[in-house]
Image (tube, helix red, strand yellow):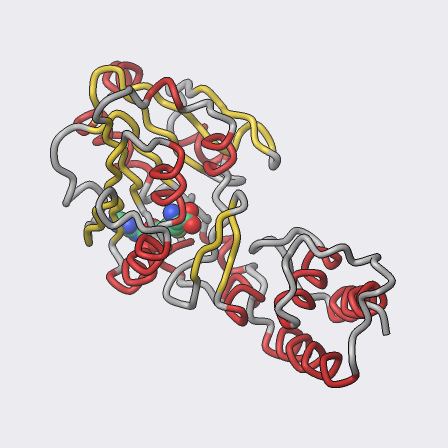
C-alpha cells in the first residue's frame, strides 16, 4: 500500500465515523495525514504522492490501531500523540490543558502587534496561558521581550512549563498561578488573552473531542462573558499608556456586543473571520471603564 492510499483510507474512515475536527486540524484529510505521518515517524512535510513511499503491513497495522483509538475514544488526536503544532512550532500537550489553536497566534505571526512591543526591554502578558503556546510564540517573535504567563490551573501551568523548557525560554518566560490578574506585577506593553469564552448553551452541545478538554479552559458562563467582564474592567490598570489588550472571543460576537454595547474594539482579521480577535488600546479601555 502506498502512503497516499493509506492516508486516503484513514480519511474515509474518519469521515464515516463522524469525528470532530478543529483541534489542530480542520478536516479529515489533514487529520489523516497527521495521524499516519506521526505514527510512522515521518516528517509532517513528507510528499504523500511519492510513489517510493510504500507502507509495510506491520506499519499499516500500527496506523490502524491509532486510527481505531481515535475513532472509538473520540479523544483528540493531539492527546493521543502528545503533540500539537501552532504556526509551525511544536508543543507538548495532554489532558491538563486545551490543545493550542488560538487565533491570536495568527495576528502575532502577521506582525500586526509589533508596534506595541518596543525595542529594548518590553513586557508582554499571556493571560490564561494554559499550555503556554502564546507565551512561547510571543517570546520567539520578540526576542527583546520578557513574557509573563498567568493561569488559574496549576495543572495547565505544568504543561506550560514543559513547553517553556522545550523551547529554551526559561530565562524569558515567567509562569504564575493566578486568578485573572491577581499575580500581575508592574506594567505590560501588551496583554494577550485567549480566555474561557464558550457560552453555556454551546458548552452543552460540544462534541466529545471538545468535552475531553478541561471545562475550566472553555466555559465562560451563561453568555460566555464571565471572565471577560472583569478582564476588560481591570486590564488598563496593568497596561502602559501606549499598551493594548488583544482578546480572543471566538464565535461570541453577539454576546460580546450585548454585554459591552459602548465598546468599539479594532477587530483583527483571522482565517476564521474578522470578529474573533479584538484589539483594545489602554486609552480606549480607560475611557470606556
Ligand atoms: C482557552 S484556554 C487558553 C489556553 C492557551 N492560552 C491557548 O490559547 O491555547 C483558557 C485558559 O484560561 C484558564 N483560566 C480559566 N479561568 C481563569 C481565571 N479565572 N484566571 C486565570 N486563568 C483562567 C484556563 O485554565 C485555561 O488554561
Q: Quadrant of the N terminus?
A: bottom right
Q: Residue at x 21, y 16 (%)?
A: 241
Q: Residue furthest left?
A: 186
**Relative height, residue 232 to residue 15 (above, below):** above
Q: Quadrant of the C terminus?
A: top left
Q: Quadrant of residue 47?
A: bottom right
Left/right of residue 78 with respect to residue 52 in the rendered view: left
Residue 66 in the image, given as x and y percentages of width and height:
64, 77
Q: Quadrant of residue 165?
A: bottom left
Q: Nearer the viewer, residue 266 or 55?
A: 55
**Relative height, residue 4 to residue 225 (above, below):** below
Residue 101 in the image, given as x and y percentages of width and height:
51, 48
Q: Is any atom of residue 221 visible in this view?
A: no
Say how many tags the image has.
Answer: 0
Left/right of residue 285 with respect to residue 21 in the rendered view: left
Q: Residue furthest front?
A: 52
Q: Residue at x 56, y 59 (%)?
A: 205
Left/right of residue 16 with respect to residue 184 in the rendered view: right
Residue 59 in the image, given as x and y percentages of width and height:
72, 80
Amino acid at each position: 500500500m502506498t502512503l497516499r492510499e493509506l492516508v486516503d483510507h484513514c480519511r474515509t474512515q474518519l469521515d464515516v465515523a463522524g469525528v470532530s475536527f478543529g483541534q489542530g486540524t480542520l478536516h479529515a484529510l489533514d487529520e489523516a495525514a497527521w495521524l499516519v505521518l506521526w505514527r510512522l515517524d515521518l516528517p509532517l512535510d513528507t510528499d504523500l504522492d511519492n510513489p517510493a513511499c510504500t507502507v509495510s503491513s506491520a506499519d499499516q497495522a500500527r496506523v490502524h490501531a491509532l486510527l481505531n483509538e481515535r475513532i472509538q475514544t473520540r479523544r483528540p488526536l493531539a492527546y493521543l500523540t502528545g503533540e500539537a503544532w501552532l504556526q509551525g512550532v511544536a508543543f507538548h500537550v495532554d489532558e491538563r490543558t486545551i490543545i493550542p489553536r488560538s487565533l491570536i497566534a495568527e495576528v502575532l505571526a502577521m506582525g500586526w502587534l509589533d508596534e506595541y512591543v518596543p525595542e529594548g526591554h518590553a513586557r508582554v502578558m499571556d493571560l490564561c496561558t494554559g499550555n503556554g503556546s502564546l507565551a512561547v510564540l510571543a517570546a520567539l517573535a520578540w526576542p527583546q521581550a520578557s513574557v509573563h504567563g498567568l493561569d488559574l490551573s496549576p495543572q495547565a501551568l505544568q504543561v506550560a512549563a514543559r513547553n517553556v523548557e522545550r523551547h529554551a525560554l526559561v530565562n524569558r518566560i515567567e509562569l504564575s498561578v493566578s486568578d485573572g490578574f491577581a499575580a500581575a506585577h508592574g506594567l505590560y506593553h501588551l496583554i494577550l488573552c485567549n480566555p474561557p469564552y464558550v457560552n453555556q448553551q454551546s458548552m452543552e452541545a460540544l462534541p466529545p473531542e471538545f468535552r475531553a478538554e478541561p471545562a475550566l479552559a472553555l466555559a465562560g458562563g451563561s453568555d460566555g462573558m464571565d471572565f471577560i467582564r472583569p478582564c476588560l474592567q481591570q486590564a488598563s490598570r496593568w497596561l502602559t499608556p501606549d499598551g493594548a489588550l488583544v482578546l480572543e472571543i471566538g464565535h461570541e460576537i453577539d454576546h460580546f456586543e450585548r454585554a459591552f454595547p459602548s465598546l468599539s474594539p479594532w477587530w483583527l482579521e483571522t482565517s476564521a473571520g474578522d470578529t474573533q480577535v479584538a484589539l483594545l488600546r489602554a486609552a480606549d479601555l480607560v475611557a470606556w471603564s
